[in-house]
Amino acid sequence: MKLTDNLIAAANKASHSKHKSRFDSLAEILSSEGKDIDKVLEKLEDFQVAIPSWALGAGGTRFGRFGFKGEPSNLEQKIDDVGMLHKLTQTAGAVSLHIPWDVPQDYNTIKELAASHDIIFDAVNSNTFQDQKDSRASYKHGSLSNTNKTSRDQAVAHNIEVIKIGDKLGSKSLTVWLADGSNFPGQTNFQHALQHTEESLKTIYKALPEDWKLFIEYKPYEPNFYSTVIQDWGTSFMLANACGDKAYTLVDLGHHLPNTNIEQIVSTLMMKGKLGGFHFNDSKYGDDDLTVGSVKPYALFLIFNALVYGMENNPQNPYPAWMIDASHNIKDPLEDLIQSLEAIQEAYAKALLVDQTQLAVAQEAQDVVKCQEILQQAYRTDVRPLLEKARLNQGGAIRPIEAYRSLSIRKQLIKERGEHSVASGL
Ligand SMILES: [Mn+2]
């Protein structure tokens, strides 16, 4: 099914007048505080987040997977789902492919389909954490860091293949996440593992087209539980520097030990011009991959405050590639993604409302109370009418979840795809 303007307009009918009065009263308050609402709306409208191709079906845990009826069973259907999300939210204008789970069969058809939904291809993701059926060497003991050269070479060749696939689709970046590490003390030589990883990454880097970027993701543990080769932002930063100007660190919100100050990491990386990519999700304990903003919305706001500051003050840092990296185990994946997109926009809008000039004055004056007041003044603002307005301006749904439900989209998808369709992925 394809969402038409008429369907969206019909879904918007019920909430239109309520939206207008809520927006008008918020606009009046913000204008009286000297805020430039048009500028905030423009930034919200420009902000696009990539949807990963593996997030459109139900995820799973190591204990099991519960399918979701009407899941997309091929790449075309996945792109249709992203198109649906984009039509409703006007925030999901990109898709991030995972190779080899989603290798296009016919590149022109896929490109045309994406273009028809106004979707671009963002970073491509390689996979060296699973053995494929026809593979010569195993990744059981690592990929880019493996002591066995055949495994390392195979992992490097796979990444170069992923670059070629992405290039045909118009992608401009490769994300590398490694599961490499060890489960037991003594199992691995840390220095050799890091050295091999650096050499492998440098070889992949050499295969990057001129206008491409390499994103190096880090993670402190899981699936290995004693050590991870690229365990933290410092290691990623070091490797990115060793590769060159086109290599950057990628921050995934779930890839930190509990209570890590992620906003400070973001600030440091942007100051050094090395924050290339960003993965959104939320967590209570570890890499829980929960809906963005569902557990720690204030932390997300503080991170966005650092991102907004960096985007405005660090021309040395490229505009980051944004992606949702979550797993949908019990919710309808499309509803979950809509909630995530809204939470991201909400945190971004609030961060845009932080009075940076006043904050700088308060910081200089060492007025700690005032600093907190300024941040929380922005955080406590209910910005949802701004999000609604930004979506409405671009032809989206005022309330995407309500529209998704009132248009019975899942029911339609089940009718078209059946109850037992299974999406590829985790
Ligand atoms: Mn990630």
Image (cartoon, rainbow, N blue to C red):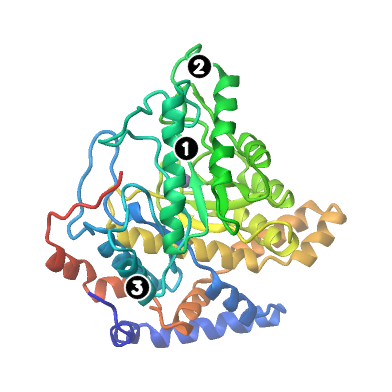
Q: Which secondary structure lies at badge 1?
A: helix
**Amino acid at pointer 3:** Glu
Residue 188 has which mark? Answer: 2
Q: Nearer the viewer, residue 412 or 384?
A: 412
Residue placed under numbered mark 1 in the picture:
156
Residue 145 x, y percent position in the rendering? 50, 27
Residue placed under numbered mark 3 in the picture:
112
Q: Nearer the viewer, residue 54 or 170?
A: 170
Q: Is residue 14 above or below residue 118?
A: below
In the image, 185: left or right of 118? right
**Amino acid at pointer 1:** Val
Give the mark, 3 or 1, whose residue is nearer the N terminus.
Answer: 3
Q: Nearer the viewer, residue 44 or 132?
A: 132
In the image, 44: left or right of 362? left
Q: Is residue 308 above or below residue 406?
A: above
Quadrant of image for the C terminus: top left
Q: Which secondary structure lies at badge 2?
A: loop
Callout in the foreground (2, 1): 1
Callout in the foreground (3, 1): 1
